[in-house]
Amino acid sequence: MAYVLQVDFDMEGPFGEEMAESFEGLAQSINEEDGFIWKIWTEDEETKQAGGIYLFDTKAHAKKYLDMHTARLKEFGIEPVRAKIFQVNDALTNINHGPVK
Amino acid sequence: MAYVLQVDFDMEGPFGEEMAESFEGLAQSINEEDGFIWKIWTEDEETKQAGGIYLFDTKAHAKKYLDMHTARLKEFGIEPVRAKIFQVNDALTNINHGPVK
C-alpha cells in the first residue's frame, strides 16, 4: 500500500522549460530520497503556483520528505507550503488504472 | 502534455474496504469520462478526508470532470470540494519516473 504526498505553493517562477533547466539537479536528488517511488511535477503559470504529486512507500517516508522539502522551500523564500498525505485505496485505484505499483 | 486534477474533501466515511465496495460502480463509470487517463483514490480515515489524483489529456477535460464531480459530491452532501488543476512539467517528471504517458 502506497502513500500520496500532494504539495503546492505560490511562486513567481520560473515555469515551463526554464523551470525544468533550473530544477534538473534537484529532480535528480529526489530519486535518492528514502522510500521515494515517483513524482509528477505540477505547475500553473497563470495562477503562479507549482508543486508536485509524489508516491512514497510509507507514510513515515512521505512525512520525512515533506518536512525536509518544506524547510528547503522556505530557504528559497517559498512559504506557506500546502501539503497533504493520503493513503491509497488500492482496490478502487486498480479499477481506474492508477499507477501505484 | 497531461493535466493533473487534485481533489480532496471532508467525509465521514466509508473508508478502506467498505469504501471500495461502495464506490466500485462509480469507479467503473469514471473510466468512461472524456479525456480520462487514470485516477489514484486517496483517503485518510484519521482526518476524515478523501479524494483523488487524476490525470486528464487536456485542461478542458479536467475542468469538465471537476464541475460534474463537484455537483455529484454536493448531492452526496459533500461540500466544499478542494480542487486544483495543474499542467505537468514533462522534463522534470520524466527524471522522477512520473507516470504521465
Image: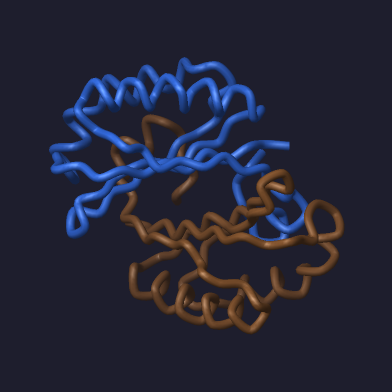
Chain colours: A brown, B blue
Task: Indicate the quadrant containing the C terminus of chain B: top left, top right, bottom left or bottom right.
Answer: top right
Query: Measured from the top left, where is residue A43 in percent x and y?
Result: 67, 51
The residue at the point 28 percent across, 49 percent down is B43
Q: Quadrant of residue B92?
A: bottom right
On the picture, is A90 further left or further right than B59?
left
Query: Measured from the top left, where is residue B2 in percent x and y?
Result: 67, 36
On the picture, is A73 further left or further right than B45?
right
The answer to whether A62 is drawn above or below residue B73 in the figure is below
The residue at the point 48 percent across, 23 percent down is B65
- In front of the other: B78 or B15: B78
Task: Indicate the quadrant containing the N terminus of chain B: top left, top right, bottom left or bottom right.
Answer: top right
On the picture, is B18 further left or further right than B50?
left
- In front of the other: B44 or B67: B67
Q: Quadrant of residue A5?
A: bottom left
Query: Measured from the top left, where is residue A23 in percent x and y?
Result: 76, 69
The answer to whether B75 is drawn above or below residue B90 in the figure is above
